[in-house]
Image (cartoon, helix red, strand yellow):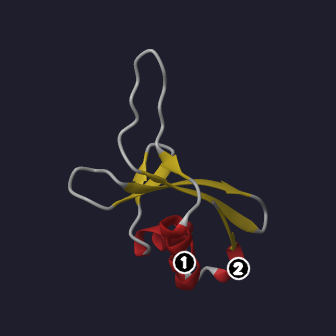
Amino acid sequence: MKINIKKSDLKENLYSFLRKCGYAPFHDSYIKVLSGSGYPRFHLYINENDNQYILNLHLDQKRPTYGKETAHSGEYDGKVVEEERERIEDLV
């Protein structure tokens, strides 16, 4: 799910804002862990242009499994993801 945030709407830098939202850096993205096991967790990838940040949000339900096939159990929409999008937008 995409979240568009105007740069001019933030009162702080993006890193500080995401920390306020409960997210921590993770490789080239940000995560918000929801349990002690590390999953489920919200996962954000960030893109930007001159005027806005584009946050790509999904929910990782479990650790990806690899073997003969790659399985990713990310949810990109649904009630839980929509509620998290609304929470982030409200914090802007």
User: Is residue 12 or residue 59 the one in the foreground?
Assistant: 59
The type of residue carrying mark 1 is: Glu
The residue under the point 50% across, 47% down is 74
Q: For the view shown, which residue lies furthest in the top direction? A: 68
- Can you tell which mark lies on residue 8? 2
Q: How many marks?
A: 2
Q: Residues within 10 Å of mark 1 (few under 14, many from 20)?
A: few
- Position of 11 with respect to 38 (left or right) is right
Image spot of residue 69 (x, y percent): 48, 20
- Can you tell which mark lies on residue 41? none
- Can you tell which mark lies on residue 12? 1
Q: For the view shown, which residue lies furthest in the right direction? A: 50
Residue 40, above or below 3: above
Image spot of residue 37 (x, y percent): 22, 50
Image spot of residue 59 (x, y percent): 47, 55
Q: Residue 22: which quarter of the image?
A: bottom left
Which image quarter is the N terminus in? bottom right
Image spot of residue 63 (x, y percent): 35, 39
